[in-house]
Image (cartoon, grey):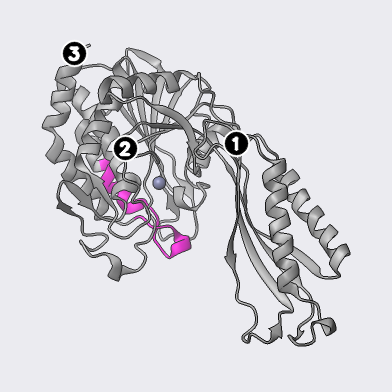
Amino acid sequence: MQYQSIFSEIERQKNEMAQTLMELIRVPAIAPENNGEGELRKTEKLVQILEVVGFDKIEHFDAEDERVPSKKRPNVIAYCYGENKAEKLWIISHLDVVPPGEESLWTITKPFEPTIKEERIYGRGSEDNGQSMVASIFAVKALKNLGIRPKRTIALAFVADEEQGSMYGIQHLLKQGLFKKDDLIVVPDGGNENGSLIEIAEKSALWFRVRTIGKQTHASRPDKGLNAHRIGMEYALALDKMLHAKYSLKDEYFDPPESTFEPTKKDKNVDAVNIVPGEDITCFDCRVLPNYDIEEVLNDIHGLAEEFEKKTGAIIKIEVLQKTVAPRPTDASAKIVSMLTEAIKKLRGVEPKIGGIGGGTCAAFFRKIDVPAVVWSTIDETAHQPNEYAKIENIVNDTKVYAFLATS
Ligand SMILES: [Zn+2]
């Protein structure tokens, strides 16, 4: 395969890629949960772009949603057929963006008025997930321009609703029966700054609040009350130790390799130094390896709370704030993992690290049904922040990786 000519063609289109990303950023696609109108206008822009490239087929899978003016949340698939038409390389990016947040923090440009500064494109949705939309489109465009048919079919999916749980996005597409177990699935919605991280696994998340209730009294007469702060601290420390000791497994795929159990937010209690607090609130953020059952962890948390209640006479309430159960990891020996590993070695000259990180992307829905999926892209991790940006160099280089995956 004539990779050099493909790569030169991609480099030749650098400015066009930047302009295309800016066109996409100019059209906000915010979820109704955040008072947005959804993704329809952005999808219209996208389809104009796709039509110029000359895909072999463009399909629409709208999900009904009464909450947006158009009543639909659009999902688009664009195909470029390969020599082997049945074998599919999917690149799945999302159309929606998170709201800008505090506008005054956008010091480079306004969120939906993209600008280029020092070879970076600034704007909401530049990195998350516009960069990958553009890179996947231009991988096909370069092949089309050169008249090269890829080895396998490239299927680009542009999905709605990723930021709010994907009900109207990838979950809607999965119901159409479009995906097969041996499809090659890349979700370019996470990564690191040199593109060496291939994410195949994620941890479960468990956030909870510990509310300890005792009896408030004057600090000179603690015997007349029950110090909720002391009991709350003792419980939190005992819980911290117990969880670390029992759930101590290490999995080198993850960074950090072990489950984490962190006491984090501490709510204010009494206003004066001379009052024994009658209530104490401490929150925990736990990220648990997928090997463990999150319900068992939760049972242990409750069990220890009961023990402390008996011992102290206080009431300890556990309030779950968030519970996300991680699916089984993608097999490290899956074909897409080795293909991407080879591509990164060849094109970047770096040793890829196969691992697990935060999670919470479209890939989780594939893992849930045992379809291998990798999360990969080259980003500085500016998503969801003010002054979000995408490096033009990263867009160009990720495009090369997609073209390589489709043709090698
Ligand atoms: Zn994203």
**Label 2 secondary element:** loop
Please name whichever residue, 277 or 295, is drawn nearer the observer in this view of the structure.
277
State which region is magenta.
29-47
Give whichever of discs 1 and 2 has the lower sequence position: 1
Three-letter amino acid code at disc 1?
Pro
> Closer to us: mark 1 or mark 2?
2
- The residues bearing labels 1 and 2 have C-alpha atoms spaced at a distance of 24 Å
> Closer to us: mark 2 or mark 3?
2
Three-letter amino acid code at disc 3?
Gln
- The residues bearing labels 2 and 3 have C-alpha atoms spaced at a distance of 24 Å
Residue wearing tag 1 = 327
Please name whichever residue, 35 or 117, is drawn nearer the observer in this view of the structure.
117
- The residues bearing labels 1 and 3 have C-alpha atoms spaced at a distance of 39 Å
Q: List the single residue furthest toward the front.
A: 220
Three-letter amino acid code at disc 2?
Thr
Residue at x 43% of width, y 50% of height:
73
* Magenta highlight on residue 387: no
Residue at x 18% of width, y 13% of height:
2
- Name which quarter of the figure residue 227 lies in: bottom right
Residue at x 79% of width, y 75% of height:
214
* Magenta highlight on residue 43: yes
Report the disc number at residue 378: 2
Please state if 116 lies on the left or on the right of 61 as rendered.
left
**Label 1 secondary element:** loop
- Residue 141: x and y in percent read 21, 29
- Residue 124: x and y in percent read 30, 56
Residue wearing tag 3 = 2
